[in-house]
């Protein structure tokens, strides 16, 4: 089992920045690929970014490419999502998740956090 706890969400104005953190406990964090997803009201959960266990491979949704950066610190069992140039359409609950391999769909992930709300005002 892997337990994941997100933090760092909040209310920010358009153009601002936030950094989300996801702290992991349980089984070996460094053996898992990690991902960030988000879900807005009335919409399906969508892929945001993913990072391999070593941090050497990273992939992003087109909607966030160039604005968001995923990173991880295996010594701290933590994965981050730096979000810059935020837009109102980025408003959602953001979830971190762990998987055996890199993936861009929720079905590929085995463990999920409880989510953290990000609200971007115009």
Image (tube, rainbow, N blue to C red):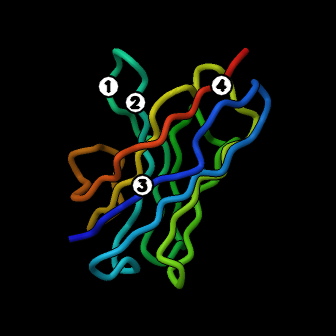
**Quarter holding the C terminus?**
top right
Dot in front, 3 or 2: 2
Residue hosting label 2: 39
Instruction: Between residue 118 and residue 57, name the one nearer to us.
Output: 118
**Callout 2 touching callout 1 (CB < 8 Å):** yes
Q: Position of residue 17 (x, y in %)?
A: 74, 41
Residue hosting label 3: 35
**Callout 3 touching callout 2 (CB < 8 Å):** no
Picture residue at 40% right of the left edge, 69% below the top: 24
Dot 2: few (<14), some (14–19), or many (≥20) neighbours within 10 Å?
some
Q: Is residue 51 left or right of residue 16?
A: left
Dot 1: few (<14), some (14–19), or many (≥20) neighbours within 10 Å?
few
Q: Is residue 85 left or right of residue 6?
A: right
Q: Mark 2: which secondary structure?
A: strand
Q: Position of residue 22 (x, y in %)?
A: 48, 60
Q: Mark 4: which secondary structure?
A: strand
Dot 3: few (<14), some (14–19), or many (≥20) neighbours within 10 Å?
many
Residue hosting label 1: 44
Vertical placement of residue 70 versus 37, above or below: below
Picture residue at 69% right of the left edge, 44% below the top: 18
Q: Earlier in the sequence, mark 3 or mark 1?
A: 3
Q: Earlier in the sequence, mark 2 or mark 1?
A: 2
Quarter of image, res 16: top right
Instruction: Between residue 23 and residue 30, name the one nearer to us.
Output: 23
Dot in front, 3 or 4: 4
Q: Position of residue 8 (x, y in %)?
A: 59, 49
Q: Is residue 109 left or right of residue 32?
A: left
Vertical placement of residue 96 versus 73, above or below: above
């Amino acid at each position: 089992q892997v337990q994941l706890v997100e933090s760092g969400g909040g209310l920010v104005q358009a153009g601002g920045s936030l950094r989300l953190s996801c702290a992991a406990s349980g089984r070996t964090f460094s053996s898992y690929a990690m991902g960030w997803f988000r879900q807005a009201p009335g919409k399906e959960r969508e892929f945001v970014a993913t990072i391999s266990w070593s941090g050497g491979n990273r992939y992003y949704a087109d909607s966030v490419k160039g604005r968001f950066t995923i990173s991880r610190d295996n010594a701290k069992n933590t994965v981050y999502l730096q979000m810059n140039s935020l837009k109102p359409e980025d408003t959602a609950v953001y979830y971190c998740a762990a998987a055996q391999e890199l993936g861009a769909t929720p079905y590929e992930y085995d463990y999920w956090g409880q989510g953290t709300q990000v609200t971007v005002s115009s």
